Each structure stands twice: as C-alpha cells, then as structure tokens.
Amino acid sequence: MSCYFRHMPDILKEAGVEVTPSNKKEVDRLIHSIVGVDYKNCSGAWKAVKGQRVEESLRAELIEKLRRGF
C-alpha cells in the first residue's frame, strides 16, 4: 500500500495533503480512484501517477482532485 508516496512529495505538498499514519490508507484509496486503478494495485497506481507527473495538464488535474478529496 502506498509504496509510491515517496516518489510524489511535490504533488502531495502542492495539493496541500499531508500523509499521516491515520490518513495514509484514505489518501491511497483516493489516488487509486483518481487514476482509475483498482485499490491495492500499487504498481498500476504508480504507473498512472508517474505519467501524470510529466504532463502538466494531467499533473494539475491530479493536484486539483487531491485538493477536493481532502
């Protein structure tokens, strides 16, 4: 679970999301939902997030959805 969080601190920070032990699972579920990957498919979620980190419009969309989720 959430093995990809360490690769996206910039996105989480920009979205205003602080990952804590108490909300880690909720953040993980939200990210899976945003990128359209079944929950607990860590590698699939990271692959989708990694692609969105590069494309600026997709990155902005990911950040906005994270903001709305929290």
Image (cartoon, grey):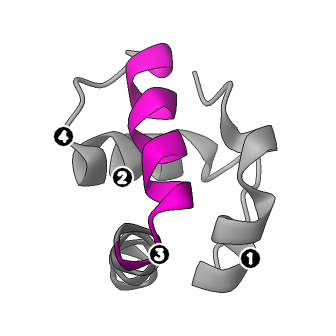
- Residue depicted at 66% across the width and 67% down the height: 12
| Residue contact at pointers 1 and 3, CB within 8 angstroms | no
Q: Earlier in the sequence, mark 4 or mark 2?
A: 2
Label 1: which residue?
13
How much space separates mark 1 and mark 4, taking CA atoms?
Answer: 22 Å
Q: Earlier in the sequence, mark 1 or mark 4?
A: 1
Q: Is residue 5 above or below residue 3?
A: below
SS assignment for the magenta stretch, majority: helix
Q: Earlier in the sequence, mark 2 or mark 1?
A: 1
Label 2: which residue?
30
- Is residue 15 shown left or right of residue 61? right
| Residue contact at pointers 4 and 2, CB within 8 angstroms | no
Residue 37, picture quadrant: top left
Label 4: which residue?
36
Q: In which quarter of the image is the C terminus?
A: bottom left
Q: Which of marks 1 and 3 is nearer the N terminus?
A: 1
Give the foreground label among 3 and 2.
Answer: 3
How much space separates mark 3 and mark 2, taking CA atoms?
Answer: 20 Å
Which element type, helix, strand or loop, lies under badge 2? helix
**Amino acid type of the residue that numbered disc 4 sits on in the rendered structure:** Gly
Q: Earlier in the sequence, mark 4 or mark 3?
A: 4
Q: Residue furthest front?
A: 55
Task: Tell me, for residue 56, which label it has, or none.
Answer: 3
Give the foreground label among 4 and 2.
Answer: 4
Please provide percent x and percent y for residue 66: 43, 72
Report the magenta residues as a range: 42-57
Give the foreground label among 1 and 3.
Answer: 3
- Does the magenta portion include 48? yes
How much space separates mark 4 and mark 2, taking CA atoms?
Answer: 10 Å
Q: Is residue 52 above or below residue 6?
A: below
